[in-house]
Amino acid sequence: MLAMPAASLAESATSPAAALPVMNIERDAISAMGVSSGGYMATQLAVAWPARFSGLAVFAAGPWGCAQGILSQALTQCMQTRFGPPDLESLQSRHADYADNGLVGAADELARQRVYLWHGDQDGTLDPQLGSLLAEQYRTWLGDPDVQLKTVKSPRAAHGWPVASSPAAVDCALGGSPYLLGCDMDGAGQALQWLYGDDLQPPTGDERGMLMPFDQSPFYDGRRLADQGYVYVPKVCEEGASCALTVALHGCDMSAAQIGEAFVRESGLNAWAAANRIVVLYPQAKPSLPNPKACWDWWGYDESSWQRDPLYDTRQGRQVQAIKAMVDHLAGI
């Protein structure tokens, strides 16, 4: 499908909640990435729809399915591990049951993904061994993990998203809001190069693009997502060029309602995107009574009140469906 004309995109940028545009997206070049709860959600997307998401990058999160719909387990085994780490065999059984019922993608599709995993060794919010367990989990799923999987650990990094430089960055070893870590490491660039190839061009600062708000309400009938998300569109993509797409998911306490546009502007993704014809979709969760930190739903808060066994981490998960619907619309699928 052809991209929206430039004039229409310009109109979108002047509206606080314009419609999400339709772009000329390469369907085999769509990836998901996220930090903390956004990392858990990105993995849920990639496992549910591996044919759609050819790449996954996770910053500071643990194994797929970790919470198993139980908040206490999310807190005690999937953030800290004082009661022991999650049992990967149990999670594999959960995945197998889902696969048998068509609730996640096929094994051969999952086996083809490229995966980048990062964790800070000084992470006091989410135990670094949980990142190692996610890597172990993916090694059992990928066709050739030595080729498809990259794991990076930063010895002095706290919990968050590492950046090379940003006026919004906090001390790498201390962390804290807005969780953009000044670690002298370009996490966005490393992840994108792994997912899309080393031939990506480093940003020069001369590239052009636009960060635009869009109306999220057509994609979600619940109350847990913000009214407005963001999409970054390089100029060449606006003009109709064929482009890749990555979905970037913020962590808890990192939504626009909490830190303004720090994450959507300062993660480093936009500069790489502008230099390499990559559209960046930034969906937004919002604070609510069951979810005061605006986390993505990786333990079932959005569905546990009305489902005995919430399917939040499957193709039927309401937030999974909403984000995939945004991707499909943007890509004209």
Image (cartoon, rainbow, N blue to C red):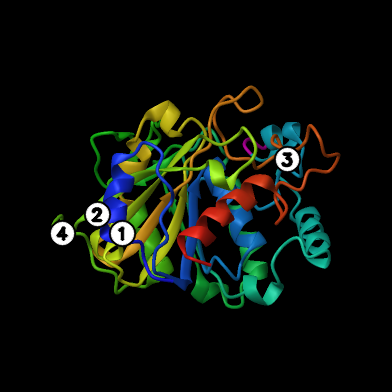
Asked whether disc 4 touches disc 1, contact meaning CB atoms under 8 Å apart, the reply is no
Q: Amino acid at mark 2?
A: Gly
Q: Which mark is residue 84?
A: 3
Secondary structure of the residue carrying tag 1 is helix
Q: Residue 78 appears in which quarter of the rendering?
A: top right
The residue indicated by pointer 4 is 204
Q: Could you say where residue 109 lies in the image, as x and y percent from the top left?
A: 64, 74
Q: Which mark is residue 209?
A: 2
Q: Main secondary structure of the magenta part?
A: loop
Asked whether disc 1 touches disc 2, contact meaning CB atoms under 8 Å apart, the reply is yes
Foreground pick, 9 / 69: 9
Q: Residue at x 64, y 22 (%)?
A: 289
Q: Which residues are magenta?
A: 79-83
The residue indicated by pointer 1 is 273
Q: Nearer the viewer, mark 3 or mark 4?
A: 4
Lower position in the chain sequence, tag 2 or tag 4: 4
Secondary structure of the residue carrying tag 3 is loop
Q: Amino acid at mark 3?
A: Gly
Question: Is 82 inside the magenta-drawn segment?
Answer: yes
Lower position in the chain sequence, tag 3 or tag 4: 3
Residue 209 drawn above or below residue 300? below
